Amino acid sequence: MNTTAGHPLRSRSGPTARRSGRTFRHPTLFRLAWAVLWCAGCARSGTGVVSSEELIKSFLSDWAKAADAVDPGTGFPRRVVRAADGMTMILIPAGTFKMGAVAGDSHAGHDEKPQRLVMLSKAYYIDEHEVTESMWHRFCTEVDEAHSTTMAGSRHGTSYHSPINGVSWHAAMEYAAWAQVSLPTEAQWERAARGGKEDLLYPWGNEDDVGMRNGPYQFDNQTRFDLDGFMYDAPVKSFPPNTFGLFDICGNVWEWCSDLYQEDYYRTGPSVDPTGPLEPPMPKPFRVVRGGGAGSSPRRELRVSQRRYAHEQSRMFGFRCAITLP
């Protein structure tokens, strides 16, 4: 199933909704176009410039509500709560950051190099933690399960507060469209994961810390999976957030990004608002996954620059959502 623009998506009218013939449009682009047209209409009608309050209201519409004070740099709330699933989203400012493996990282893969400056020209919201089992259940009960491609579930979730794990990229995209958001680009994911800190191996520093993430602990050629208190996936927010307020950004479950994977993309891709290659560079459509999981090697796979890829239909991962500001 193709989930890019042009994909006919089911409506949100309830659990018996069927796929319609309407063309799905990316929610961020739709809101941006709507805001631009509205501003142009105000100018033509002589009402003048749209106020920041009106722009915020038009952008949030019915998909989210403000949950924090306004950020003076963007004029948007620092946090919003999504109507569809109750997820809190954190505002990440626009700006330039260093993306990729830091100098001297002996475990870095060649696809993490070279480290480069990347500019994200627009601020965006990203989920404060991974989508949970309970949120997934709400989605499944609202859409038509008989025709859904997304009925995979968590294999080791300890509760409804555990992250959903075991969904395909298409499933994650379908959930995001239902919530009127999208998946983060790889660049958005890494900027958010770094929390404004650069040249670090992990979001919290240059040394692994079992108290900061859900994952195994390795010592003396041994591996223990329970020293952090969890044998498998941990309930979200069980560990401290990074400096942007994001939980479980490394460890717990691998997370889908929207980008197609390309091995040399850091050498050939744009440095401003990169979104991945436009066409699959490999015979099969592989997508980027980031962040590592409960069984990932701390030295290799929990590093913030670690890149991995998987087939779009692979049901081994979780996700968090994002949406770009106008």
Image (cartoon, rainbow, N blue to C red):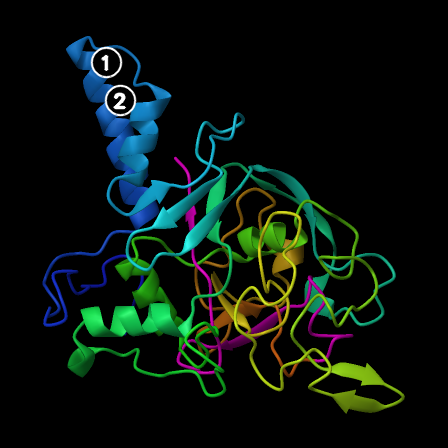
The quadrant in which residue 120 appears is: top right
Secondary structure, mark 2, is: helix
What secondary structure characterizes most of the magenta part? loop
Whether residues under marks 2 and 1 lie with C-beta atoms below 8 angstroms apart, the answer is: yes
Asked if residue 158 shows in the view, the reply is yes
The quadrant in which residue 147 appears is: bottom left
**How far from the left and from the top, in percent, is residue 66?**
38, 39
**Nearer-the-camera pick, 298 or 237:** 237
Given the image, on which type of amino acid does mark 2 rest?
Cys
Residue 23's place in the image compared with 95, above or below, is below
The quadrant in which residue 279 appears is: bottom left
The residue at 16%/75% (across/down) is 144
Task: Please give left or right for residue 35 compared with residue 273 in the image.
Answer: left
The residue carrying mark 1 is 43
Secondary structure, mark 1, is: helix
Residue 19's place in the image compared with 205, above or below, is below
Task: Please give left or right for residue 207 compared with residue 165 in the image.
Answer: right
Q: Crowding near pointer 1: few (<14 within 10 Å), some, many (20+)? A: few
Q: Residue furthest bottom?
A: 222
The residue carrying mark 2 is 39
**How far from the left and from the top, in percent, is residue 117?**
69, 44
Q: How many marks?
A: 2
Q: Which residues are magenta?
A: 297-326
